[in-house]
Image: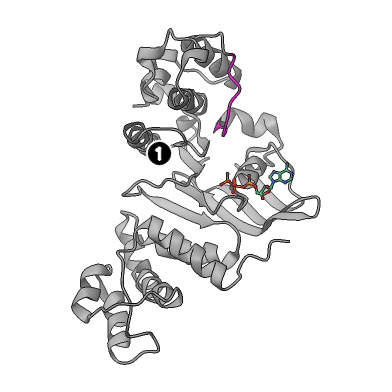
Amino acid sequence: MVTRAHCPWRRRTGEMDGMVIDVQHLNLRYGDFHAVRDLSFHVERGELYALLGTNGAGKTSTLEIVEGHRAPTSGTVTVFGASPRDRAAVRPRIGIMLQESGFTPDLTVRESVRLIGGLTGREDTVDRVLAIVDLTAKAGTLVSQLSGGEKRRLDFATAVWGAPELIFLDEPTTGLDIQSRDALWAAVDRLREDGSTIVLTTHYLPASPPLLVVAVLSTVVMMVALSLATAGLTNSPEHAQVTTLPVSLGVIAVSSWVGITGTADLTLLKRLLPGGAATELVLDAWNGGAPLTDSLILLAPTLSWVVIAISLAARMFRWEPRR
Ligand SMILES: Nc1ncnc2c1ncn2[C@@H]1O[C@H](COP(=O)(O)OP(=O)(O)OP(=O)(O)O)[C@@H](O)[C@H]1O
């Protein structure tokens, strides 16, 4: 666990309240190719915010802009109220796990962590960081002798040194075995509990996502639909109440759109959909002959399922005019 002693920024009470990242009408073109189209979202302090999307949707490109590594073609981005290109203002407060970090192969794990940590200007100890990323046993091993998953955990170490206020993780679980993946999600959750705001891209979602806010790149429609739908999957009761209706509607509507057929009766619906007054409303409408198909299979709306279903629907409705 991160202690207060490791978190000097916590003392600046009040400064961190509210919005950490604000992205408005972001566009990025690589020559003629429109990689990110009119993307807007914001991230609040203490949130775990995931950018989801199909391969090539623009997740890494967006992250690179917010991290200050790349300039947008148009749109505005602020991090802690400053431009992410303002390194002096922003860099000391953020930790970044790239898709691939270039570590020197003939340094040990301990030397690598100390070297990268030293560059952040934040205080921490190698032992604490190695414990977070579960590399204590490999402290004396040369980077060239690490496995792919161990190298990925070393990448993670560079992002968490000094308990930064804002942590970016680009595909953090790539190459990790199931156990390491679970351990990483647990570490991410602990970092968030300790006060860090976390923004990540991933194709592998934990089975029970912690308090998770999601944007799906490609289209505004997808982003809005999924943000609403997934908010209902969080463990926050107030969110769940507000968003039960979109979750229920989303499950029924997407099932209909993608043409899944089968039989579902009211009892099954009640079992599978989230509970609450909003669900009752949806069921009443459906049962009373609302314009929805009477023949569909309903799936429990896990986050992965919603992503797949909305991606399919997006393809069917050609929601991705990318060029
Ligand atoms: N430097 C570049 N020059 C030209 N096109 C690029 C460049 N970098 C990325 N692209 C293109 O922009 C699109 C978005 O790339 P990006 O890496 O942001 O996607 P992604 O959502 O992170 O994908 P993945 O899930 O596969 O990692 C892709 O089609 C990619 O080919």
Q: Is residue 170 above or below residue 103?
A: below
Residue 31 visible in this rendered orientation of the protein: yes
Residue kind at label 1, given as amino acid type: Arg
Image location (x, y in percent) of residue 203: 47, 47
Please state if 87 lies on the left or on the right of 147 as rendered: right
Q: Which residues are magenta?
A: 96-104
Label 1 sits on a secondary structure element that is helix
Residue 289 position by quadrant: bottom left
Image location (x, y in percent) of residue 142: 49, 10
Please state if 278 lies on the left or on the right of 31 as rendered: left
Image location (x, y in percent) of residue 218: 60, 59
Our reading of the magenta stretch's main secondary structure is loop
* Residue shown at 42% from the left, 11% from the top: 139
Tell which of 46 and 63 is nearer to you. Answer: 63
Q: Residues within 10 Å of mark 1 (few under 14, many from 20)?
A: many
Tell which of 160 and 93 is nearer to you. Answer: 160
